[in-house]
Amino acid sequence: MADLFEFFKENEGKLHERPGEKAWKQLELRLERRRKKRERRIRFLKIGLVALAILMLLLAAAMVIFFKL
């Protein structure tokens, strides 16, 4: 266990290294692509849920009309 603590003590300075600008740009591009894909999926789900709700309301209205006659 002492070896592990020594390892961290010796390499503590490496924990504070910052990546270069190019790495940050690539990470931002990758995250932006994921965000856009997720937004498309969420938009599709919202439209689907609204269409399902309208369909269920129309079906309920048709059943009320049919069983009242």
Image (tube, rainbow, N blue to C red):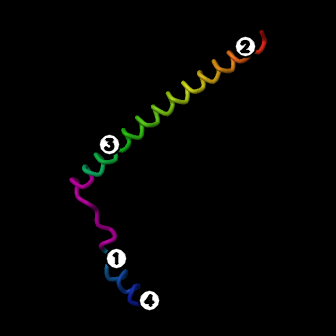
Residue 12's tag is 1
Q: Which residues are magenta?
A: 14-24
Residue found at the very far right of the displayed protein: 68
Residue in view at x 68 percent, y 15 percent:
62
Residue 26 location, x and y as percent?
Answer: 25, 50
Sequence-wise, the earlier of marks 2 and 4 is 4
Cβ atoms at labels 3 and 2 below 8 Å apart: no
In the rendered view, tell whether residue 55 sits above or below residue 46: above
Nearer the observer, 30 or 68: 68
Q: Kindly state the secondary structure of the residue where label 1 is placed.
A: helix
Check if mark 3's residue and mark 1's residue have beta carbons within 8 Å.
no
Query: Along the horizontal axis of the image, is 48 left or right of 67?
Result: left
* Residue that mark 4 sits on: 1
**CB contact under 8 Å: marks 1 and 4:** no
Give the residue pinned by disc 3. 33
Identify residue type, mark 2: Phe
Count every numbered label the image shows and give the total: 4
- Given residues 43 and 19, the one toward you in this image is 43
Mark number, residue 66: 2
Query: Which of the two marks, 1 or 4, is nearer to us in this view?
Result: 4
| Secondary structure type for disc 3 | helix
Question: Mark 3 or mark 1, which is nearer to you?
Answer: 3
Task: Find numbered disc 4 in the image and state the secondary structure of the residue it sits on.
Answer: loop
